[in-house]
Image (spheres, rainbow, N blue to C red):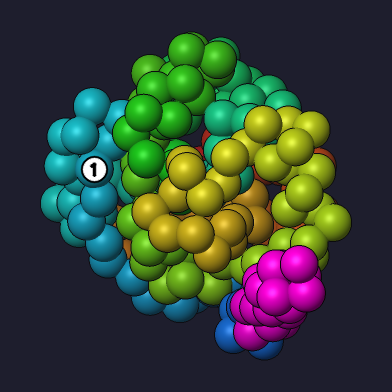
Amino acid sequence: MNKFLMIMALFSFLSVWNQAQAQTKFKTVNQAKGLSVGEVAPKFNSSDQENRSFNLENTLESGPVVLIFYRGQWCPVCNKHLAAIEQDLDQIYAKGATVVAVSPETSEFLKQTMKKTGASFKLLHDEDYGIAEAYDVAFLSDEASLNAYNERLGANLQEAHSDDSQRLPIPATYIIGQDGIIKWRHFDPDYRKRASVEDIVAALSEL
């Protein structure tokens, strides 16, 4: 019995130690600052909810790109935001722009977002958080928040993402010009604050 208790204590220690290591390895929500207006937008390749390829550089040839980071299909605020984008999507398209939304979730979960929001634009899988890291929006939540996401909201982050670090993106929105430069951004660590369609259209009108 003592040996069993020692093993359980070891597992508990390793769990706490791994969490501490992750917290020091990855940025917190307040450490992620996001790329600024005027910076070169990192180019990337990805795949959408139907596993079709997407290339940012090629897409910019036809007009500016509205790049939206969202947390996942489990996030009610994200779903409300993407549904609002979809509702007035024609206003954005009228400015010649393409809309894409990026999440660390795999295609199975991207399809759930599509069903919940009615999104007709591309939902992209951010494998290994490469896109979020490039735009400096990736962070690791505290343990209490992660427990809430996984247990109360059914996020299943370790299953839904490409690794088990459970990082998330700050729900930022970027407008990238055809020259590959960031022209506008909405960046706020408060996940409840999102870019409105009106703000996006106004920013596109100034390009």
Q: Secondary structure at mark 1?
A: strand
Residue at 55% over, 15% down: 116
Residue nearest the viewer, comparing 182 with 194: 194
Pointer 1: residues within 10 angstroms few (<14), some, or many (20+)? some
State left or right for residue 145 relative to residue 53.
Answer: right
Please name the predominant secondary structure of the magenta segment in the image: helix
The residue wearing badge 1 is 47
Residue at 23% over, 27% down: 50
The answer to if 8 sits in the magenta stretch is: yes
State left or right for residue 145 relative to residue 90.
Answer: right
Q: Is residue 47 visible?
A: yes
> Against 83, is 4 above or below?
below
Q: Which residues are magenta?
A: 1-21
Q: Position of residue 114 (x, y in %)?
A: 44, 20
Residue at 47% over, 41% down: 160
The answer to if 91 sits in the magenta stretch is: no
Residue nearest the viewer, comparing 104 with 102: 104
> Against 87, is 91 above or below?
below
> Against 132, is 100 above or below?
above
